[in-house]
Amino acid sequence: MDLSGGTRGKVPFPHQLHQENLGECNICHSIFPQVPGAIECMKEQGKIEEQYVMKKLCIKCHKKERMAGKPHGPTTCAKCHIR
């Protein structure tokens, strides 16, 4: 699954891996609904800021896991976005 990454390029998002590692869907889905395109729709409606998901959810969680010495995802923008 790919998420829109705006002008920096798409962002691959291994949804199943996140489901397995987090075990709790509401970590993310308490913020946006479990429907395809929800993030883009919320951005268009002004309900979330343009970079909110990546900076406030993804990178924040990845850094927290890194600090705990656990396996983690990328912690910089350039490591996620594909042009």
Image (spheres, grey):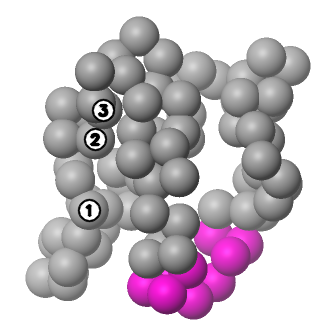
Residue occupied by mark 1: 73
Q: Is residue 30 above or below residue 50?
A: below
| Quadrant for the C terminus in the image | top left
The structure residue drawn at horizontal position 75% and vertical position 53%, both measured from the top left corner, is 31
* Amino acid type indicated by mark 2: Cys
- Kindly give the residue lying farthest to the top in the view shown: 7
Q: Residue 41 appears at what percent x and percent y?
A: 81, 28
Element class at badge 3: loop
The residue carrying pointer 1 sits among few (fewer than 14), some (14 to 19) or many (20 or more) residues within 10 Å by Cα, namely some
Q: Residue 12 appears at what percent x and percent y?
A: 40, 47
Element class at badge 2: helix
Q: Is residue 82 above or below residue 35?
A: above
Which is more N-terminal, label 1 or label 2?
Answer: 1
Q: Is residue 76 above or below residue 6?
A: below
* Amino acid type indicated by mark 1: Gly
On whether residue 24 falls in the magenta region, the answer is: yes
Element class at badge 1: loop
Q: Are marks 3 and 1 in contact (CB under 8 Å)?
A: no
Q: Are marks 3 and 2 in contact (CB under 8 Å)?
A: yes
The part of the image, by quadrant, that contains residue 27 is bottom right
Q: Distance between the Cα atoms at labels 3 and 2? A: 4 Å
Going by the image, does 21 lie left or right of 81?
right
1 vs 73, nearest the viewer: 1
Q: Distance between the Cα atoms at labels 3 and 1? A: 13 Å
Which is more N-terminal, label 1 or label 3?
Answer: 1
Q: Magenta residues?
A: 19-27
The structure residue drawn at horizontal position 19% and vertical position 31%, both measured from the top left corner, is 78
83 vs 34, nearest the viewer: 83
Residue occupied by mark 3: 81
Labelled disc at residue 80: 2
